[in-house]
């Protein structure tokens, strides 16, 4: 029988109130940044389209990139919360949100998305299959460290290849390293999720710390708040997976 505090930790991690808080937070951030008023029309992004004119643009063939971005962000958060709870449906949903995110990222000007997102898409499929076959939470082994090394090699290769193919001129080389490192951390997180390593959400903690620092430097307070929520979620889940593993949530008296 596990100590009561371990069960309490799992109850907190699995709490529906955290799901609701995350959804409200992401929705408020998207509305604050006017994502819902953004469309892709006549080959370019158009911001600040009022809702009174929104549907007339859609009827003329405009792509509701902001609305889909907002919906995608909420669904992605819920999928992430399902993964926290070890529900494979979260990985399955992640396959489709990766496609949505890739298209939106590309339309917003990140042309290297055609290189990086297909890899994330394949990892999401692989993860879904692994979990379906009954993958169990495990400690880091030699394979884990080889995967970490491979992830950063792939990350640097794809990022530099993307800059070269699309002719992106960056005077400050630190920016390239920042992009490659953050992408590498996300790859490690995704691959660790597939194999359900205990360190999975420790990796996602580092990823969110990096995003907080990056967005803080850029002055993007909304994204800083969002990643603080993700960071808290990742830290709690790291300890839950480490202490409770694959144990089922049981009713306890507190």
Image (cartoon, helix red, strand yellow):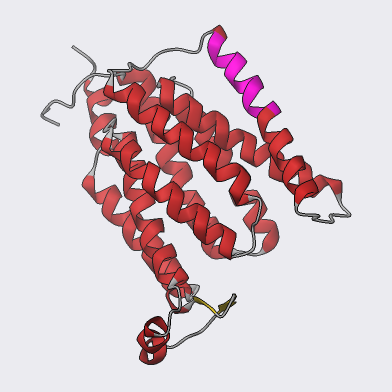
- Quadrant location of the N terminus in the rendered image: top left
Residue 129 or 83: which is nearer the viewer?
129
Measured from the top left, where is residue 48 in percent x and y? 51, 84
Residue 209 or 152: which is nearer the viewer?
152
Residue 82 in the image: above or below residue 10: below
Measured from the top left, where is residue 80 in percent x and y? 37, 42
Measured from the top left, where is residue 50 in percent x and y? 43, 88
Residue occupying image coordinates x 73% and y 35%:
156
* Helix, strand or loop: magenta stretch: helix
Extreme-top residue of the structure: 142
Residue occupying image coordinates x 35% and y 22%:
130
Q: Is residue 178 left or right of residue 105?
A: right
Q: Is residue 150 magenta?
A: yes
Extreme-bottom residue of the structure: 52
- Quadrant location of the C terminus in the rendered image: top left
Q: Is residue 157 magenta?
A: no
Residue occupying image coordinates x 46% and y 69%:
65
Residue 119 or 3: which is nearer the viewer?
119
Residue 119: which quarter of the image?
Answer: top right
Magenta segment range? 143-153
Measured from the top left, where is residue 194 in percent x and y? 42, 25
Residue occupying image coordinates x 29% and y 48%:
18
Residue 55 in the image: above or below residue 221: below
Q: Is residue 131 left or right of residue 101?
A: left
- State how many labels appear: 0
């Amino acid at each position: 029988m596990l100590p009561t505090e371990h069960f309490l930790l799992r109850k907190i991690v699995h709490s529906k109130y955290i799901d609701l808080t995350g959804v409200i937070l992401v929705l408020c951030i998207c509305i604050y940044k006017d994502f819902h008023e953004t469309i892709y029309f006549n080959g370019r992004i158009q911001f600040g389209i009022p809702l009174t004119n929104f549907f007339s643009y859609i009827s003329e063939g405009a792509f509701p990139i902001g609305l889909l971005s907002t919906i995608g962000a909420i669904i992605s958060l819920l999928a992430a919360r399902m993964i926290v709870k070890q529900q494979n449906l979260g990985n399955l949903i992640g396959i489709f949100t990766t496609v949505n995110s890739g298209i939106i990222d590309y339309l917003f000007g990140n042309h290297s998305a055609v290189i990086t997102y297909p890899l994330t898409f394949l990892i999401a499929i692989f993860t879904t299959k692994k979990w379906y076959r009954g993958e169990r939470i495990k400690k880091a082994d030699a394979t884990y460290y080889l995967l970490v090394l491979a992830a950063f090699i792939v990350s640097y290769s794809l990022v530099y290849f993307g800059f070269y193919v699309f002719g992106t001129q960056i005077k400050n080389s630190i920016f390239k390293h920042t992009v490659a490192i953050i992408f590498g951390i996300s790859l490690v997180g995704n691959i660790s999720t597939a194999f359900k390593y205990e360190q999975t959400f420790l990796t996602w903690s580092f990823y969110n710390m990096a995003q907080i620092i990056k967005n803080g430097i850029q002055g993007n307070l909304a994204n800083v708040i969002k990643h603080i929520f993700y960071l808290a979620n990742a830290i709690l889940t790291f300890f839950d997976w480490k202490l409770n593993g694959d144990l089922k949530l049981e009713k306890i008296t507190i």
